[in-house]
Image (spheres, rainbow, N blue to C red):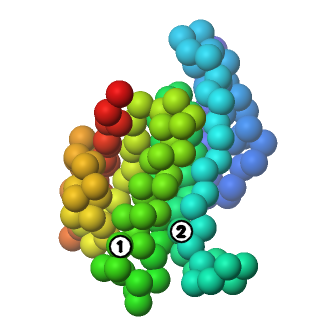
Amino acid sequence: MNPKLELSETDQPDVRKLLYGGLAVHNRKSVEAPQVRPLWVLLREEDRGPVIGGLMGATAWSHLRIEALFVPERMRGTGAGKRIVEMAESEAIRRGCIGAWLDTYSFQARGFYEKLGYAVLGEIADYPPGHTRYFMKKSFKQ
């Protein structure tokens, strides 16, 4: 057999499905499929007003993954971000989670997350150039 390789810059939805499907079959040999449950905390200035920020994440395999957190600049430093994360963590604990993880950049919110008990578990320097990407985790007290 002489496999051929091809380089492409074009999105390949069918190939993406094949790759993820193949990984899922392989992974099932070691772990069950995760029960992924979306978790959103929406920030509004008033009841039923438009969403102006919040948190997007999911729980799976007994952990909360914070995918995105945004607080409008005018509300930063008011405790809104802390309350958003605490609400997400409380719901994650209610769902049986034992910890949380996320990634952030040196120009974003590492210090904010550290104040909330998150610790750096890894980093990629110069990603993007001149900055660092941090991977952080927090264990919930049992």
Query: Farthest residue toward the top?
Result: 29
Label 2 Cα crowd, 10 Å radius (few <14 / some 14-19 / many 20+)? some
Is residue 73 in sight in this rendering? Answer: yes
Q: Quadrant of the N terminus?
A: top right
Q: Is residue 7 above or below residue 29?
A: below
Q: Is residue 85 left or right of residue 58?
A: left
Can you identify the residue that label 2 sits on? 54
Q: CA distance from mark 2 to mark 1?
A: 13 Å
Which of the pair 111/46 is nearer the observer?
46
Classify residue 6 by image quadrant: top right
Q: Helix or strand or loop: what does disc 1 sit on?
A: loop
User: Quick one: label 2 or label 1, which is nearer the N terminus?
Assistant: 2
Query: Farthest residue toward the front?
Result: 47
Which of the pair 26/52 is nearer the observer?
52
Is residue 132 in sight in this rendering? Answer: no
Can you identify the residue that label 1 sits on? 79
Query: Farthest residue toward the bottom?
Result: 74
Mark drawn on residue 62: none
How far across and down, in percent of the image, does residue 109 sit?
30, 67
Label 1 Cα crowd, 10 Å radius (few <14 / some 14-19 / many 20+)? few
CB atoms at circles 2 and 1 under 8 Å apart?
no
How far across and down, in percent of the image, does residue 98 sit?
41, 31
**Residue shown at 48%/37% (left/top)?**
93
How far across and down, in percent of the image, does residue 112 sit?
27, 64
- Amino acid on which disc 2 is placed: Gly
Q: Is residue 24 left or right of residue 17?
A: left
**Residue shown at 22%/56% (left/top)?**
114
Classify residue 30 by image quadrant: top right
How far across and down, in percent of the image, does residue 20 sit?
66, 33
- Amino acid on which disc 1 is placed: Gly
**Residue shown at 41%/84% (left/top)?**
75
